[in-house]
Amino acid sequence: MNAFLYIIVLLAWGSSWFGISFQLDYDVAPQASIVWRFLLASLMLFIWCFARGLKLSFPWREHINWLLLGFFLFCINYICAYFGTIYLVSGLVCLIFSTLTLFTVLNGFVFFKKPVRLPILFGAIVGIAGLSIIFSNEISSAEWSLDSGIIKGFLWMLLATFFASIGMLLSGQMQARKIPVIQSNAFSMLYGSLILVTYISFSDLSFSFDTSYNYVVSLIYLSLVASVIGFGVYLKLVGNIGADKASYVNIFTPTIALLLSTLFEDYVWSWTGLIGVILIIFGNIIVLYAKPRSI
């Protein structure tokens, strides 16, 4: 069952790169696109809850938790990530965000008193090494100087990864208390969107929307597939196997995106790229077969 969930997340998030690339071609601020994405995803989840008669009345303490989850997982990490993409090429963005497993392990130990599972730490390092090999050309061609902005982008992406790992650990804690994932995502996405709206209103960004076919279709795809399905299944996986194991998905996801690019954009693989994929798969095996922690 967990392997099936894992594959769904890989396909949902690996294909989301295409949806995001469509949205960047229009005169809509990326932060505004994030708001539309998660507002629509939240609406879809609430409609599902109403249709299935799922409970929507919860104590105010849970709403505080969802506000925090929305801030970390559906707001601040995306703001930092978009700042990072201003300075970095896509390969470096993928590589830095792949450290999510490391952040999840370390933040789980520091802030949530979770034991460090060494096989997962080792597997994550192997996977990051594989991803580094795949994007070695982009890494070597980048201008690593203080004037180039690479350092700024690097720091922004590290912050994005740090905040995302906190959100995933929070979700794991909520599920341990038997808080349902669907309602949790519905409220958290709503609160994260409202925080982003507040941020945009106090910035110099324009809050706009594009009615073109490509923008609307990509928005629906990102809301339904990458957000409702992707985050729903992923956070369920977090509850099942732990945030540290589940976060390895973010190392594997760029490989799925490259495979899709091979089919639709004529991406050509090199021997170094294949070696990188082998390392990622090997790291994935180490992570997934790590012994469960005792509770």
Image (tube, grey):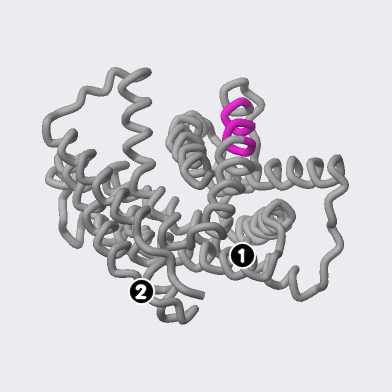
Q: Is residue 28 left or right of residue 82?
A: right
Q: Secondary structure at mark 2?
A: loop
Q: Position of residue 222 (x, y in %)?
A: 57, 36
- Quadrant of the rendered image containing residue 253: top left
- Quadrant of the rendered image containing residue 289: bottom left
Q: Position of residue 277 (x, y in %)?
A: 23, 39
* Residue labelled with disc 2: 116
Measure the alpha-carbon separation of dots 2 and 1.
Answer: 23 Å
* Residue labelled with disc 1: 69
- Mark 2 and 1 residues: CB-CB less than 8 Å, in contact? no
Given the image, on which type of amino acid does mark 2 rest?
Val
Residue at horizontal 86%, vertical 62%? 57
Residue at horizontal 84%, vertical 43%? 52
Whether residue 248 is situated above or below residue 229 in the rendered picture: below
Q: Is residue 264 left or right of residue 177?
A: left
Q: Is residue 222 magenta?
A: yes
In front of the other: 127 or 64: 127
Given the image, on which type of amino acid does mark 1 rest?
Leu
* Badge 1: residue crowd in 10 Å (few <14, some 14–19, many ≥20): many
Report the predominant secondary structure element of the magenta stretch.
helix
Can residue 20 be seen here? no
Residue at horizontal 37%, vertical 73%? 106
For the magenta stretch, what is the residue range? 217-224
